[in-house]
Image (spheres, rainbow, N blue to C red):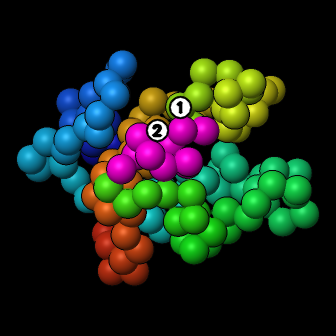
């Protein structure tokens, strides 16, 4: 199922050298904050010494924390999107080296969530 979603995601977004906001393709599955986005953030950002407790970086432990870095519907204007798609640590790439960058599928999931309005819906059921 995740491979089908990844295929749809790659067809749904076009970020390469675009200067405008991408559009979602009809039928793009709903991305859920708790079940999709927060899992990515918890496994890549909320780690010791980073955005988890005790780090100097801003907390990313809740929807409210994460939403401070998001412009709903506009990934290209969202700080969260900018830092996960930066090309180097000098440009603010997160997570910073030597940690591995997010995969293209993880970036797509976060981007789609932002395009879908970056909502927090406790009843959302992930299609992944």
Tally of numbered tags: 2
Residue appearing at x 20%, y 41% in the figure:
23
What residue is rendered at 36% in x and 19% in y? 17
Residue 72: horizontal and vertical position, in percent?
38, 60
Residue 110, placed above or below residue 7: below
Expressed as whole percent of the image width and height from the top left, the position of residue 113 reads 36, 55
Pick whichever of labels 2 and 1 is earlier in the sequence: 1
Q: Is residue 10 visible?
A: no
In space, the residues marked 2 and 1 are separated at their CA atoms by 8 Å
Q: Looking at the rendering, which quadrant does residue 6 occupy?
A: top left
Residue assigned mark 2: 107
- Evaluate whether residue 66 shows in this view: yes
Does residue 7 show up magenta in the picture? no
Compared to 116, does 92 lie above or below? above
Q: Residue at x 43, y 57 (%)?
A: 71
**Do callouts 2 and 1 mark residues in contact (Cβ within 8 Å)?**
yes
Label 2 sits on a secondary structure element that is: helix
| Relative to 67, residue 26 above or below | above
Q: Quadrant of the N terminus?
A: top left
- What secondary structure is the stretch in magenta mostly built from? helix
Q: Could you say where residue 90 lies in the image, as x and y percent from the top left? A: 74, 24
Q: Which residues are magenta?
A: 74-83
Decide if residue 25 is on the left or right side of residue 119.
Answer: left
Q: Residues within 10 Å of mark 2 (few under 14, many from 20)?
A: some
Q: Which residue is identified by label 1?
A: 85
């Amino acid at each position: 199922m995740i491979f089908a979603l990844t295929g749809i995601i790659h067809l749904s977004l076009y970020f390469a050298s675009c200067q405008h906001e991408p559009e979602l393709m009809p039928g793009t599955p709903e991305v859920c904050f708790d079940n999709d986005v927060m899992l990515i953030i918890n496994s890549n950002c909320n780690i010791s010494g980073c955005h988890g407790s005790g780090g100097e970086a801003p907390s990313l432990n809740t929807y409210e924390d994460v939403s401070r870095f998001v412009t709903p519907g506009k990934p290209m204007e969202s700080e969260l999107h900018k830092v996960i798609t930066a090309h180097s640590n000098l440009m603010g790439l997160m997570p910073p080296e030597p940690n591995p960058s997010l995969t293209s599928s993880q970036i797509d999931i976060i981007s789609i969530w932002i395009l879908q309005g970056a909502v927090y819906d406790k009843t959302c059921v992930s299609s992944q």
